[in-house]
């Protein structure tokens, strides 16, 4: 924009710039600088004041990681200068190779240059980071380990820069004295925005020279779905259509990013900021939330779909919107004289072409040589005479030290672009309608290459494979597709038209939003809620999910118990048809008892079951349901682990009653006495019964020991088989008795039950606790899910509860009270063995 020399240095030209811009919007051809000056003189004082407010003082902060980053921020600055604003450019030089200024920043009002001490001393070279120093090795892309290594190194750089910047009192003073209206910075860390707050800037903007990645998105509360939003730093080849394993890796990349990287910058920089600016300085996250907008170097038609915020404004294409220039004569002649067209080859300014191996260069040259009708213009500074001779052999390959990439891409004879896929290069190719042979090297380049491939404008090659045998064939095949498959050129042309016809261009959006936010600095109504605000449980609806799961779990449990009850109620031991057949065969009830064992064997059911089915005695409905439920529980013993079965000893495991045998040993038979009946009905404890007998017998210790040694109890029929089956299913077995411990231990050994599992009711606690107390202790100690008590007497029946099931046994003694009170009443152990072996 040309000004007359008389206006230089006075405030009037600044105001006229703003007025000129407004007038030209309505009369773009008729308004001149002179007419704007005349109009300004005619304005009343109050309108001149309003006009003065239209010209903003802007600070553009550019952390110079690479040329493309400063090129984008320079384009932002230049766009605001063209809009008539007063722009200051603060460059923080972090890469000496990017020391030369791009043309975009030559129009700013004031240029501030800050070079950290570690860069001045040469203590750090960003190009020596592992992913960058050997860019053509194929090691530039890894999983979260790559993120960790790279982000830790960049975080260290940002920490050192932040410390030096905030301690540069003179620079802070000069910036504060400028009274900036707005300020912009790339949003990789928080320190620039803390400085903006310190110098009194109300309206702050973020910017990104690369695609929006997860870390920055999270700072704006934008959720990331790893199912289809691939991690920008470690992208999956499937892009938004990842397979299972890609989604698996992407999920854990995002998880690592969330757990480790989210607060990495805040934790490092906040202590530095508070040390420099005071302990009462606002939290960095709060300052970040107050950032008005973020300008992303993206276009909605050249980006993968993802959740977004109204605070994200896409201004992709700013760098590529400068006016094209005439090519250098030598380059112009090469393109004009090409038979089929020209192809440009460039791997950007960050990657050092000297690190490309001779074998890889030769593979490129051989592949290019197989397209003699095309001219290849390669941005490649020859390192020595030997390399010059190597290139000279290929007449259609032209190495150049520098090229006007944008002007070349806009040339009508340009056919393809061999590119590393830096975002600016890919955007320029897309805006020019040129297909790409994509060979990404590091950072966001793989993401950009995958994006270009998904849009149908690129063939993607893996640079790691170009170090192997067959690299020439891979390059040739990729180029052949790009040059000879018309779909790539067609897709590129369609994408170019979308760029050209997108309503509201990048420059207009940038300018209008900056001016709007300057008028309304507080745009927090556009904020999405942060995880820190809502809390992790609410943000991810974990509380709702847990509540729903609990309700569904309770509902499922109730349904299960209801279904179980219905199943138990309606399940019959044998079919009704079988009952009718049995009754017809037997004829008369008198013949039933003589033939019941024969029929039981032929029907493979126990005689006890047969007796119950044919009802030799009346059974109530309640008794029948209780027995069916008991059978289900008994079968479940082999499934509900851990489980246990407790046996009474007398008249259960063995056929005798030890107290009766004890008195009989001394020649006194009390087996049918009142003492025995009271003991077995639970009206008298074993100890009390024993004391009664001792009063009658008054035996000596020697006589007692003689009884114990000579007494050989008889095992009940079927018990050995039952115990064997219970052992097979891993069910714990116990003998719970109030009888003689020596006899019980001998029985345990014969049944292969551990002696330690003999539980005496008189020794299981500090005082005699009975069989119920023993069962309760066993359940508590071993956490049994099911515990069954089997016995013949009333004291055994008292063990339920805590036992889950009591089975009354009448193989040796039949006690009516036990029959009525038991869950299941059996006359032989074979019944229990058969039912346990049954399946549902």
Image: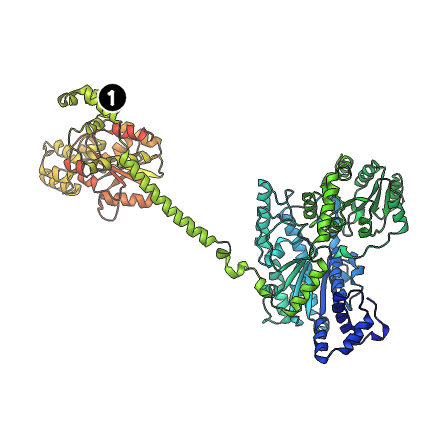
Q: Judge from the rendering whether residue 100 lies leftward or rightward of residue 171; answer left or right.
A: right
Question: Taking 549 as reference, is 168 above or below it?
Answer: below
Mark 1 neighbour density, 10 Å: few (under 14) some (14–19) many (20 or more): few
Element on which disc 1 rests: helix
Question: Taking 782 as reference, is 611 above or below it?
Answer: above
Instruction: Pick the quarter of the image with the C terminus.
Output: top left
Q: Position of residue 686 (x, y in %)?
A: 17, 41
Residue placed at 68% from the left, 68% from the top?
182
Residue placed at 66% from the left, 72% from the top?
200
Can I make out residue 755 in this image? no
**In the image as oriented, which residue stretches furthest toward the bottom?**
45
Q: Judge from the rendering whether residue 498 lies leftward or rightward of residue 681; answer left or right.
A: right
Question: Taking 284 as reference, is 639 above or below it?
Answer: above
Q: Position of residue 617 (x, y in %)?
A: 15, 31
Q: Quadrant of residue 730?
A: top left
Q: Position of residue 831 (x, y in %)?
A: 25, 28
Q: Quadrant of residue 113?
A: bottom right
Name the residue tied to disc 1: 601
Q: Nearer the viewer, residue 322 or 825?
A: 322
Can I make out residue 517 in this image? yes
Q: Position of residue 579 (x, y in %)?
A: 22, 25
Instruction: Pick the quarter of the image with the N terminus.
Output: bottom right
How many marks can you see? 1
């Amino acid at each position: 924009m040309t000004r007359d020399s008389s206006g230089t240095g006075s405030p009037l030209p600044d105001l006229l710039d703003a007025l000129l811009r407004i007038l030209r919007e309505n009369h773009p051809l008729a308004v001149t600088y002179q007419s704007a000056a005349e109009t300004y003189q005619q304005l009343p004082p109050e309108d001149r004041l309003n006009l003065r407010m239209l010209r903003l003082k802007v600070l553009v902060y550019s952390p110079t990681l690479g040329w493309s980053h400063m090129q984008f921020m320079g384009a932002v600055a230049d766009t605001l200068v063209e809009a008539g604003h007063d722009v200051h450019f603060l460059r923080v030089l972090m890469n000496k190779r990017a020391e030369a200024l791009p043309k975009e920043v030559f129009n700013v009002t004031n240029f501030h240059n800050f070079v950290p001490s570690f860069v001045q001393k040469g203590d750090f070279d960003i190009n020596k980071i592992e992913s960058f120093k050997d860019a053509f090795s194929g090691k530039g892309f890894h999983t979260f380990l790559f993120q960790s290594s790279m982000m830790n190194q960049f975080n260290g750089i940002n920490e050192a820069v932040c410390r030096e910047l905030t301690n540069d009192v003179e620079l802070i003073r000069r910036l504060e004295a400028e009274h900036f209206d707005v300020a912009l910075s790339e949003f990789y860390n928080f320190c620039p925005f803390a400085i903006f707050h310190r110098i009194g800037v109300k309206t702050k903007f973020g910017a990104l020279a690369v695609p929006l990645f997860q870390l920055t998105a999270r700072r704006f509360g934008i959720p990331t779905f790893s199912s289809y939003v691939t991690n920008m730093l470690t992208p999956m080849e499937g892009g938004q259509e990842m397979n299972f394993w890609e989604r698996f890796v992407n999920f854990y990349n995002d998880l690592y990013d969330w757990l480790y990287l989210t607060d990495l910058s805040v934790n490092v920089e906040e202590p530095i900021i508070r040390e420099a600016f005071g302990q009462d300085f606002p939290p960095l996250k709060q300052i970040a939330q107050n950032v008005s907008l973020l300008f992303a170097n993206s276009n909605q038609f050249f980006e993968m779909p993802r959740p977004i915020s109204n605070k994200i404004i896409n201004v992709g294409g700013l760098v590529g919107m400068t006016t094209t220039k005439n090519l250098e004569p030598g380059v112009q002649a090469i393109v004009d004289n090409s038979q089929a067209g020209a192809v440009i080859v460039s791997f950007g300014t960050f990657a050092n072409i000297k690190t490309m191996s001779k074998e890889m260069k030769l593979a490129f040259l051989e592949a290019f040589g197989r397209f003699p009708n095309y001219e290849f213009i390669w941005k490649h500074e020859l390192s020595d005479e030997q390399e010059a001779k190597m290139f000279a052999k290929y007449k259609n390959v032209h190495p150049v030290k520098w090229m006007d990439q944008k002007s070349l891409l806009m040339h009508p004879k340009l056919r393809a672009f061999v590119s590393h896929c830096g975002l600016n290069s890919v955007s320029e190719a897309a805006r020019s309608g040129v297909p790409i042979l994509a060979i990404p090297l590091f950072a966001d380049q793989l993401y950009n290459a995958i994006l270009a491939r998904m849009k149908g404008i690129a063939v993607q090659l893996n640079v790691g494979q170009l170090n192997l045998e067959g690299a020439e064939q891979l390059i040739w095949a990729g180029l052949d597709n790009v040059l000879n498959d018309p779909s790539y050129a067609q897709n590129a042309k369609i994408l170019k038209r979308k760029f050209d016809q997108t309503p509201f261009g990048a420059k207009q959006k940038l300018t209008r939003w900056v001016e709007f936010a300057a008028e309304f600095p507080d745009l927090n109504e556009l904020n999405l809620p942060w995880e820190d605000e809502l809390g992790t449980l609410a943000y991810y609806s974990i509380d709702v999910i847990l509540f729903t799961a609990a309700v569904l779990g309770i509902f499922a449990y109730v349904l299960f118990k209801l279904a179980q009850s219905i199943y138990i109620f309606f399940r019959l031991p044998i079919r009704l048809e079988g009952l009718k057949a049995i009754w017809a065969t037997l004829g008369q009830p008198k013949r039933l008892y003589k033939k019941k064992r024969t029929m039981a064997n032929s029907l493979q059911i126990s005689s006890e079951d047969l007796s119950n089915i044919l009802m030799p005695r009346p059974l109530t409905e309640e008794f029948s349901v209780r027995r069916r439920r008991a059978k289900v529980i008994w079968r479940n013993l082999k499934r509900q682990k851990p489980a246990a079965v407790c046996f009474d000893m007398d008249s259960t495991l063995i056929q005798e009653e030890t107290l009766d045998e004890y008195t009989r040993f001394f020649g006194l038979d009390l087996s049918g006495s009142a003492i025995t009946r009271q003991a077995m009905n639970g009206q008298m404890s074993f100890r009390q019964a024993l004391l009664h007998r001792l009063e009658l017998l008054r035996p000596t210790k020697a006589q007692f020991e003689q009884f114990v040694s000579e007494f050989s109890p008889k095992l009940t029929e079927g018990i050995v088989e039952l115990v064997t089956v219970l052992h097979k299913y891993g069910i714990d077995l116990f003998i719970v008795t109030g009888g003689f411990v020596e006899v019980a231990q001998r029985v345990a050994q014969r049944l292969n039950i551990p002696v330690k599992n003999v539980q005496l009711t008189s020794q299981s606690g500090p005082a005699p606790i009975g069989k119920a107390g023993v069962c309760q202790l066993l359940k508590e100690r071993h956490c049994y899910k099911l515990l069954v008590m089997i016995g013949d007497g009333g004291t055994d029946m008292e063990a339920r509860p805590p036992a889950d099931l009591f089975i009354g046994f009448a193989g040796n003694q039949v006690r009516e009270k036990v029959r009525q009170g038991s869950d299941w009443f059996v006359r032989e152990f074979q019944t229990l063995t058969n039912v346990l072996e049954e399946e549902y």
